[in-house]
Image: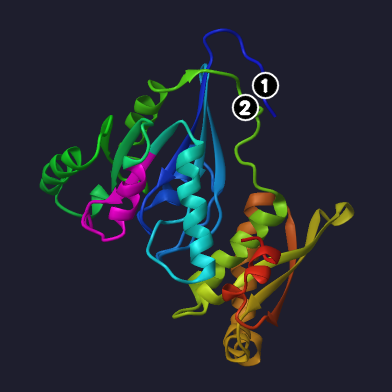
């Protein structure tokens, strides 16, 4: 909801874009001081655009964490990339993120191609500077300064917080007069059901390997509050593409699904400050990631 503010208030929408696995979700969580986007060492974890609202003194920044832009042929990943590229046309400022140790990632060319089509202010964040020697930074900064028009280049460790304050200042200086788009007590537009599904999906990424995380989707069927027990009862369905994936996800004597559920429950209890009962089920939905109708039904 748009909230009117006195004269002098600044606001703007900002896209965080870049190749997969460069730390976009980690940056959003760091900016907001809380977890609103799931993270994983595996690439292409983020599938939907996630809104994060940063409230400053006299200004508001609305960040869009976008899926990683990459070459793809599958309907699921095409949907993800389309969501990311569309964000560039919808925002006021663009933050392009790369990582220091992989400045020549081939997917970066796709990001730069989209950037060249817009005249919006663009900043480059070189992330994960804590992972290697700092002398690598200057050549990267020089190279990218020649490739595309950039208003600022910010070296950063989103994980450790280094460089984040400078990024906020660089962005604040480029905001324009405008309203507060969201209330001061709101930090994300995510629903409870979306957040629960994302936390479960994150735990699937951390407990399984190979193609299984990418072949899994989660839908939340029910969240019910049991006030007298300070309890939230949740039920969710994990969708996979084959019977063999279902067997792996459940595990011998149910050990895998139990481990995923336990990890998710521990994190959800911290987020909701409540005891959680989590019922997880697994359903085979043949080749859902290649079926446009299934993608829409599952929220992609």
x and y percentages locating residue 261 in the rendered image = 65, 71
Within the image, what quadrant is residue 268 found in? bottom right
- Front-most of 173 and 293? 293
Locate residue 156, reporting x and y percent: 29, 42
Rendering quarter of residue 70: bottom left
Marks 1 and 2 sit apart, C-alpha to C-alpha, by 6 Å
| Mark 1 burial class by Cα count in 10 Å: few <14, some 14-19, many 20+ | few
Q: Is residue 148 left or right of residue 41?
A: left
Above or below residue 192? Residue 150 is above
State the image coordinates of residue 149 (x, y, percent, origin top left). 25, 34
Q: Residue shown at 26%/59% (left/top)? A: 105
Q: Give yes or no for contact between labels 1 and 2 (Cβ–Cβ under 8 Å).
A: yes
For residue 107: magenta? yes
User: Tag 1, which secondary structure?
Assistant: loop
- Provide the residue designation for mark 1: 3
| Secondary structure found at label 2 | loop
View extreme (front): residue: 117
Residue 46 in view, yes or no? no
Q: Is residue 124 above or below residue 109?
A: above
């Amino acid at each position: 909801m748009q909230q009117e503010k006195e004269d002098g208030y600044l606001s703007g929408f900002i896209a965080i874009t870049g190749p997969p696995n460069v730390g976009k979700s980690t940056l959003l969580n760091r900016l907001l001081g809380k977890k609103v986007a799931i993270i994983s060492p595996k690439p292409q974890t983020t599938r939907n655009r996630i809104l994060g609202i940063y409230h400053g003194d006299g200004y508001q920044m609305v960040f869009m964490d976008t899926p990683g832009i990459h070459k793809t042929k599958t309907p699921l990943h095409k949907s993800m990339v389309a969501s990311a590229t569309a964000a560039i046309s919808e925002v006021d400022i663009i933050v392009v993120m790369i990582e220091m140790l992989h400045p020549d990632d081939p997917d970066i060319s796709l990001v730069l191609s989209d950037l060249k089509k817009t005249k919006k202010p663009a900043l480059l964040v070189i992330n994960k500077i804590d992972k290697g020697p700092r002398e690598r930074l200057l050549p990267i900064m020089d190279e990218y300064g020649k490739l595309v028009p950039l208003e600022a280049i910010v070296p950063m460790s989103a994980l450790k917080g280094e460089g984040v304050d400078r990024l906020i200042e660089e962005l604040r200086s480029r905001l324009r007069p405008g309203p507060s788009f969201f209330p001061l007590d709101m930090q994300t537009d995510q629903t409870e059901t979306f957040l629960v599904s994302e936390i479960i999906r994150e735990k699937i990424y951390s407990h399984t390997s190979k193609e299984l995380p990418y072949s899994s989707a989660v839908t939340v069927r029910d969240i019910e509050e049991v006030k007298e027990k300070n309890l939230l009862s949740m039920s969710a369905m994990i969708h996979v593409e084959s019977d063999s994936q279902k067997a792996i996800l459940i595990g011998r004597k149910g050990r895998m699904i139990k481990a995923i559920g336990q990890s998710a429950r521990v994190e959800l209890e911290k987020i909701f400050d409540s005891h959680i009962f989590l019922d997880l089920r697994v359903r085979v939905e043949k080749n859902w990631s290649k079926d446009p109708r299934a993608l829409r039904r599952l929220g992609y």
